[in-house]
Image (cartoon, rainbow, N blue to C red):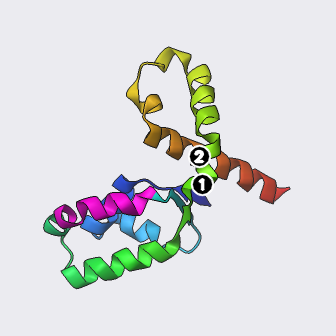
Amino acid sequence: MRLVIDANILFAALIKNSLTAKLLLNDKLKFYAPEFLFEEFAKYEDYLLNKTHRTKENFKDFYNLLKQKIRIIPKKEIEPFLKQAKEILCQKYFFMKELTLFTKPIRVVYIFLLASNANSALQEKK
């Protein structure tokens, strides 16, 4: 199964050895994220280290393991489709046009990745 993860999922797994952390280690799951995911991590690393129940060494080891498991989608692969993704979302969810969920560029990136992963998963099954 293919899953797109955002920074909140990564952060939750790093803070606590939880079900989320265990799922991220599951070999049957493939994870995808936009390249800015790890930029977000860098911004909040000190905060996360203060909140975690992990030792600093365990935190770093787990982070490095997750970096290996998550396939990063480069910005250059996403950018050409952002305008179209936003337009599709606004048309489909026209009644929600004013909600920031669908207008924030980051959310559009995640939704685009979800859609493209769903599409490529369908293509693989054919």
Which residues are drawn in magenta?
36-48
At numbered mark 1, what does the secondary structure look like: helix, strand or loop?
Answer: helix
Residue 42 percent location from the top left of the image? 30, 64
**Mark seen at residue 76:** 1
In x, y percent, where is residue 24? 45, 68
23 falls in the magenta region? no
Report whether 85 appears left or right of 7: right
Q: Quadrant of the C terminus?
A: bottom right
What is the three-letter code of the residue carrying label 1?
Lys
- In the rendered view, tell whether residue 60 sits above or below residue 107: below
- Distance in Å between CA atoms under marks 2 and 1: 5 Å
Specify few, some or many for label 1: CA neighbours under 10 Å numbering under 14, 14-19, or 20 or more: few
Farthest residue to the top: give it. 95
Residue 18 place in picture, x, y as percent: 31, 66
Residue drawn 56% across the image and 23% down it = 90
Residue sitting at x 64%, y 33%: 84
Q: Are marks 2 and 1 in contact (CB under 8 Å)?
A: yes
Q: Secondary structure at mark 2?
A: helix
Helix, strand or loop: magenta stretch: helix
Tell me the quadrant of the picture where the N terminus can be found: bottom right
Residue at 61% x, 35% y: name it: 85
